[in-house]
Amino acid sequence: MPKRPIASATPLHAALRRRPSPARADDGLSACVHCGGDFVTPVRHEPVGRDRWWLYLRCGQCGISREVTVSNAAAERYDDELIAATRAIRRAADELERRRFAAEAEAFVAALRRDLIDAGDFARPLDR
């Protein structure tokens, strides 16, 4: 019986659960060479001449790091992938924040309706 995909528990998990990019001969930078995860991030980078980049990469999933030298085109593709992933994380974090605020507002309204909160809860303490 084929395995069904596991449903994402949170929007953040859904945003982070990306399919690995197809490997190219000159890059494949976002895929970890050890665990295969796609959480590889640049720790340091420096230009090597005018047409290449040295990158020190680390996998956020397993912790393995590596050094690579890639073409400008490969570095630019990797940068585009990182920008897209950052946007996905930002959207997911914003959604989680909206949900948290909505839950807090609902709890506050419920407490007001049950007379658990009144104006005295917001009064400043008297200075003595």
Image (tube, rainbow, N blue to C red):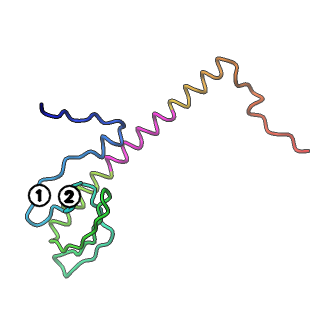
Q: Measuring 27% from the left and 76% from the top, which residue is drawn there?
A: 46
The circle drawn on residue 23 is 1
- Horizontal and vertical percent position of residue 111: 64, 23
- Compared with 68, 22 (above or below) is above
User: Start and end of the magenta stretch?
Assistant: 87-101
Q: Are marks 1 and 2 in contact (CB under 8 Å)?
A: yes
The circle drawn on residue 108 is none
Q: Is residue 45 left or right of residue 73?
A: right
- Horizontal and vertical percent position of residue 25: 7, 64
- Horizontal and vertical percent position of residue 27: 14, 64
Label 2 sits on residue: 31
> Residue 33 is drawn in which quadrant?
bottom left
Name of the residue lying farthest toward the bottom = 49
Question: Magenta span has 72?
Answer: no
Lower sequence index among marks 1 and 2: 1
Q: Is residue 88 left or right of residue 25?
A: right
The amino acid type, in three-letter code, at marker 2 is Ala
